[in-house]
């Protein structure tokens, strides 16, 4: 029997392969439940889950809210526009107040890397990192691994290209850790300004030219160009980016017919991905959203149960 | 300190045949067309073996499903179960359901299974068949068919092993530390 040891989910690097497998297995069960007429189980009855989103998000916040609701938890939503952050209250004070109201789980989205870890070390509530700056977005990586395994089976030695703005991407970092845990072969592709060679220290390849890598890729993971995070100019213009790195029908022609196209959303149609490709059968974009709900239910379920004496049964 | 319990309750393949035959006589599957629903992990494989015996002795086919009880357990806050997705091959509405599990202990697992089943529809009736009843009920729930009743110290665990998952057919009694 292996105990579930984590109070919080802050980073993919916390998870062993067994723990990651457990979350995927649990998510498979939740996916079955989500296909039923009554999509609800009582596991988190009486628990209070707070969505604390200090940075805008639609998909992730709704996904967590729905996941908690499907588990019968009570859910509160707090976003930066309507909260006391506008009045200058600190993150820790806000979170302490939520804790005092009886929050069992706090889901945090914040623009500062390390913010989820900061709260996790200071509060007894379970903290789930829903994106902290350019650091990590662990539930996104878990749902991506879930989606790839559903489509392609094993990830062992599968060739994964992650294309775009790696520098500012928490999704890329979490995915690198997760995909490596499953033995994938990862190449990061983008302009040198957004994909510096320093990423090689994570055990991945860095490339600045896309076309040469397309014919052997099993997974092409496209990232959004994050205009809001760019303080300087990292490439000359959108048209140049599309010309060099946009996934166009011509480029799709270079890919294996079995290759899958992934995107964490929100996507810029016509920039990193051609509109027709986004809607093609090779695209997993909406599957990722669908799987995200089951995966977030699995994370909430594991954490809410997680205490020191928690154990996996052998039978 | 592992002792085999076959001397007390009989060997597993014989018990499984006995379960299948008693269920056949009690519920007339050829007339009532029940669904066999196993409680994972070993309850499901028991249900499959029951269906296989019905098929070979009576040429009668019965669908076998499994019901995931993980998310309905009342001990969830102290014990994190390993989920097995629910698979029911046919709708349960209006059907006779025969729930199958290996060991019946407190009744809490079956309570969770009943709740999980009722989230999926309204069966005509639910019956419970187990190999061993440990006679330590904590709820007003008991099996309709239990092949053996064993009243032993709660610190001794009865562990059923099946070829499908354990590479052997055996019944063990294991002292819990």
Image (tube, coloured by chain):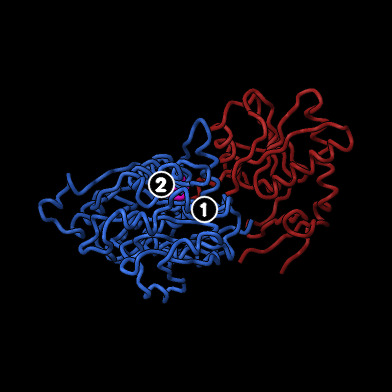
Chain colours: A blue, B red
Mark with earlier residue (2, 1): 1
Total of numbered circles in the picture?
Answer: 2
Q: Residue A136: within the magenta?
A: no
Please identify the quadrant where the N terminus of chain A is shown: bottom right
The residue mark sitting in front, 2 or 1, is: 2
Say which residue appears at 46% left-offset and 45% top-offset. Answer: A277
Say which residue appears at 36% left-offset and 63% top-offset. Answer: A166
Horizontal side of A264 relative to A280 (left or right) equals left
Q: Chain of mark 2?
A: A
Residue at mark 1: A146
Say which residue appears at 38% left-offset and 74% top-offset. Answer: A197
Residue A285 position in % (x across, y down)? 45, 46
Highlighted range, magenta? A292-297
Q: Is residue B130 above or below residue B157?
A: above
Residue A169 position in % (x across, y down)? 34, 61
- Asked if residue A293 shows in the view, the reply is no
Q: Residue A293: within the magenta?
A: yes
Distance, label 2 to label 1, CA atoms, is 25 Å
User: Judging from the image, what secondary structure is the residue with disc 1 in?
Assistant: helix
Q: Chain of mark 1?
A: A
Horizontal side of A246 relative to A103 (left or right) equals right
- Asked if residue A137 shows in the view, the reply is yes
Residue at mark 2: A274
Q: Is residue A189 above or below residue A257?
A: below
Horizontal side of A293 relative to B55 (left or right) equals left
Residue A204 position in % (x across, y down)? 46, 71
In this view, the residue in front, A313 or A302, is A302
């Amino acid at each position: 029997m292996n105990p579930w040891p984590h109070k919080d989910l802050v980073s993919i690097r916390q998870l062993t392969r067994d723990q990651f497998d457990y979350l995927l297995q649990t998510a498979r069960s939740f996916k079955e439940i989500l296909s039923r007429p009554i999509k609800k189980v009582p596991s988190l009855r009486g628990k209070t889950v707070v969505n604390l989103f200090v940075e805008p998000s639609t998909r992730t916040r709704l996904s967590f809210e729905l996941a908690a609701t499907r588990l019968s938890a009570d859910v509160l939503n707090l976003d930066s526009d309507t909260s006391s952050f506008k009045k200058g209250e600190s993150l820790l004070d806000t979170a302490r107040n939520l804790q005092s109201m009886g929050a069992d789980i706090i889901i945090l989205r914040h623009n500062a890397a390390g913010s989820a870890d900061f709260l996790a070390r200071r509060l007894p509530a379970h903290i789930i990192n829903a994106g902290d700056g350019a650091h990590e977005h662990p539930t996104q990586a878990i749902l991506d691994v879930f989606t790839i395994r559903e489509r392609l089976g094993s990830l062992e030695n599968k060739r994964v290209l992650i294309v775009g703005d790696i520098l500012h991407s928490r999704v890329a970092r979490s995915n690198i850790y997760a995909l490596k845990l499953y033995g994938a072969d990862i190449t990061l592709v983008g302009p040198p300004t957004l994909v510096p060679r320093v990423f090689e220290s994570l055990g991945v390849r860095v490339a600045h030219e896309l076309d040469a890598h397309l014919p052997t890729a099993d997974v092409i993971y496209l990232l959004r160009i994050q205009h809001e995070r760019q303080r300087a100019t990292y490439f000359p213009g959108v048209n140049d980016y599309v010309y060099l790195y946009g996934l166009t029908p011509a480029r799709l022609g270079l890919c294996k017919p079995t290759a899958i196209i992934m995107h964490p959303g929100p996507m810029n149609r016509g920039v990193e991905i051609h509109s027709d490709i986004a809607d093609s059968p090779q695209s997993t974009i909406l599957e990722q959203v669908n799987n995200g709900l089951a995966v977030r239910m699995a994370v909430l379920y594991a954490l809410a149960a997680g205490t020191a004496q928690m154990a996996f049964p052998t039978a | 300190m592992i002792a085999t319990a076959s001397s007390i309750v009989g060997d597993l393949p014989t018990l499984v045949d006995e379960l299948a035959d008693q269920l056949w006589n009690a519920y007339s599957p050829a007339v009532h067309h029940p669904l066999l629903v196993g409680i994972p992990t070993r309850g499901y494989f028991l249900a499959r073996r029951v269906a296989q015996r019905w098929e070979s002795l009576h040429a009668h086919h019965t669908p076998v499903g499994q019901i995931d009880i993980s998310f309905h357990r009342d001990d969830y806050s102290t014990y994190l179960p390993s989920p097995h997705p629910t698979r029911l091959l046919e709708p349960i509405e209006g059907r006779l359901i025969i729930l199958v599990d290996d060991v019946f202990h407190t009744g809490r697992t079956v309570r969770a299974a009943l709740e999980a089943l009722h989230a999926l529809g309204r069966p005509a009736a639910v019956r419970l068949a187990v190999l061993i009843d440990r006679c330590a009920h904590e709820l007003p729930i008991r099996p309709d068919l239990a092949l053996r009743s064993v009243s032993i110290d709660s610190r001794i665990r009865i562990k059923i092993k099946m070829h499908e998952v354990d590479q052997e057919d055996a019944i063990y009694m294991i002292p819990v530390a």
